[in-house]
Image (cartoon, rainbow, N blue to C red):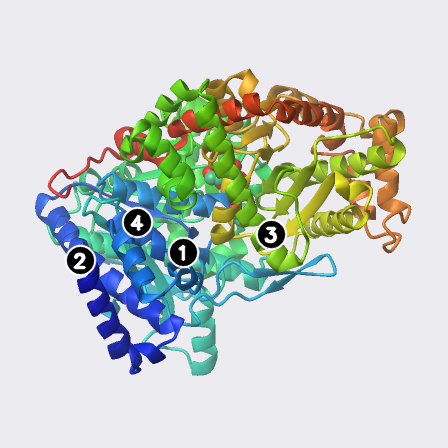
Amino acid sequence: MFSSNEQFKQEFIDRVERMSGKSFADSSERDQYQALGNMVREFASQNWISTNEQYRYSGTKQVYYLSIEFLLGRLLKHNLLNLGIEKIVEESFTELGISLDAIEELEADAALGNGGLGRLAACFLDSLASLGLPGHGCGIRYKHGLFEQKIVNGYQVELPEHWLRNGHVWEVRKLDHAVEIPFWGHIESTMENGRLVFHHVNAERITAVPYDMPVVGYKNKTVNTLRLWNAEPSAYPIHKDILKYKRETESVSEFLYPDDTHDEGKILRLKQQYFLVSASIRSIVRSYRKQHISLQHFHEHVSIHINDTHPVLAIPELLRFLIDEEGYGWDEAWEITTKTISYTNHTTLSEALERWPIRIFQPLLPRIYLIVEEINRRFCNELWERYPGDWKRIENMAIIANEEVKMAHLALVGSHSVNGVAQIHTEILKQREMPLFYEVFPNKFNNKTNGITHRRWLLKSNPQLASLISEAISDEWIAKPEKLELLMEYQDDSLFLEQLSKVKERNKHKLVETITAKTGIALDPTSIFDIQVKRLHAYKRQLLNVLHIMHLYNRIKEDSSFSITPRTFIFGAKASPGYYFAKKVIKLINTVAKKVNEDSEVSKYIRVIFLENYRVSLAEEIFPAADVSEQISTASKEASGTGNMKFMMNGAITLGTMDGANVEIFERVGNENIFTFGLSADDVLRLQKQGGYRAMEYYQHDRRIRKVLDQLVNGFFSEEQNEFEAIFDSLVAHNDQYFVLRDFSSYVDVQSKVNEAYRNQNEWWKKSLVNIAKSGHFSSDRTIQQYANEIWRIRSNSNVL
Ligand code: F58
């Protein structure tokens, strides 16, 4: 389309003027952003249409990835890169005196997710399209994405996020594909031609309107679709109070994770979940129907994947569709459904498994509830035949028990594949968390270790490293990330290692500029950049990191001969708004940061930064600048982690527990290229069974721990005396469920090994190089290819490529 810079510039200028109604000279950066975005989307549209046509005519099997979260971040540069037009745009902009970076800044992050689970979905979409695989996303078009975080006086304050304020150039509203979703009301049944037929009477209907976004594959002409559903009032409301109905309807796609501490919030979340799956299944069937009349072979042409249990109602909804709307009998409908649906589990924390009270579920989704009851009845009967008299086991495995619907049980029973997201996680699911289900369905369980898209997390966000790599081993690694391994040849090439260190230095400078501009705090780019960025959660143990910093502070103060390699500790994390403990940890990090940074003696060695509003676009600046990647979860609790992979790919060294994907990073880079510490997952699980360890003894007998913990409550930080009492209590009074004090000593030791290691620069950059070289395995292309081959059984459509 753009054969030369001249042609691009002319079209761009015309477009800016046509869209803004201003002369190009008078146009604003926003006008330019809008024009560029539109041009790029139109450009992608040609391939979007042809990809859809190819899929339709070839009848190739399609996969739909249903997820309550898609943490996309910005799309402009990503799309330019994947379409292969970033060079022409960059050069033309330079000629026009426009900064592409400044234009990119105008795009709001699409933050329709809160962490790894949502970002994984976004990486998967990129890999599906880039591998030419027919895979599409289905989600919700939340009006407000994840809240914007402000830090006020050290505390997290949440502000509503407005990514749609200026519209979103990448989406296309498809009103003609809207569908109606029923809630509430009641079910009546009649006999018709010898069949029991169910009618949903007096239902309140919500219109689901799709907004489609193109998902552009990397230079391969494939453009898949991310379909996000918007909730709108139905044209035929039965409600008397129209305003109330409108408000309630729109609230369904208003917020990601509404507060569910009360029933109203719970109802809204469940409504969102059914809204997503029902709308998606209707649209999937509609598209399937363009080539097939009967749904008998649906599972041979369609795979539906559910990302965690949030979309698990896809199981009863597909059954309902087949039985109520298509007239299938239960057994046939059940077979089609289970063969269509596969499920990923993302947590070992049993408290995180979703359950819905019947009193909420049944009235909101009366027909779906009847179907879940029937699934449960049949499943319990089967169990009874297999384990006669074993009531306890059946109760533990039932889908409905203790007045609740257990969503994970529904997913395990109603799908043909259940996967964990790292080897250790899958083993824990099989052996410890779901052993009863593993015994019944051993063949359903499988592992798919997570991955990240190397195109966004290396090629786009760290262009200098990408070029250095390509100069050395050619750019073959972009299509085949496992080729990064060729870098191993440069382990002893001191010139290459020197260049690697220079790239890191420049990335650190860039991050320092961003931080200083935001906080006014000057940082030393020659210090070790030690970074922990992730959701704030007790099991991720940001607390262990900050307790260690407090300990370092004490060491520097106590012992004038104590010297360490200067280190900058950087944190970024959002705490869920209702999570009291997590918010206290944020306050503690900020309090310690202030004390450290303002102390001239201590700040010679260490500095602490809490980066406000951690999000995808900020992450893209952070990973390339890291030396040390903090992955310090209590072993057995982090299902996989994906930040660990992003750090590794950018040459940071992992400092971590043997948890989640850290274990597989360890296996690949070897002991000398990673710093591990702490209890193993087996230790933790064994101790937990015995009721934990004695945290109080560690407090009493380790004077380093005692000193730090006392400082939490003795006013040392000149804060209110009881500010950090809850943290102190979690460790001592409540016996430290996350083994923070137990792992403290081991963590201090490994941290001092990091200091030592950094002193030998040549060795350090060698470690860094090995990490980059071994990171290709953690590309989501590998992960997606495994899902495609082993679960979905889809193939790339070679005509599309
Ligand atoms: C994350 N889960 C896991 N959940 O914690 C992480 O280990 C894994 O790498 C990642 O999934 C991808 O598999 C996660 O992000 C959530 O955000 C929950 C969503 C529902 C509300 C509670 C948090």
- 479 or 141, which lies in front? 479
Q: How far apart are labels 3 and 4 at the CA level?
A: 29 Å
Say which residue label 2 marks: 4
Left or right? Give the position of 212 relative to 146: left
Disc 3 residue crowd, few under 14, some 14–19, many 20+, Cα 10 Å: many
- 760 or 67, which lies in front? 760
Examine the image and state in which quarter residue 124 appears.
Answer: top left
Sequence-wise, the earlier of marks 4 and 1 is 1
Left or right? Give the position of 71 relative to 209: right
Instruction: Say what secondary structure mark 1 lies in.
Output: loop
Mark 3, ligand 1, within 8 Å: the answer is no
Disc 4 residue crowd, few under 14, some 14–19, many 20+, Cα 10 Å: many
Say which residue label 1 marks: 74
Q: Is residue 512 above or below residue 186?
A: above
Residue 583 location, x and y as percent? 69, 52
Q: Is residue 363 above or below residue 435?
A: below
- Amino acid type at image mark 2: Ser
Q: Residue furthest left?
A: 57
Residue 574 is labelled as 3
Instruction: Say what secondary structure mark 4 lies in.
Output: helix
Residue 646 is labelled as none
Q: How far apart are labels 3 and 2 at the CA level?
A: 44 Å
Say which residue label 4 marks: 81
Q: Quadrant of the C terminus?
A: top left
- 627 or 481, which lies in front? 627
Residue 555 location, x and y as percent? 83, 32
The residue that appears at 45% across and 65% down in the rendered structure is 163
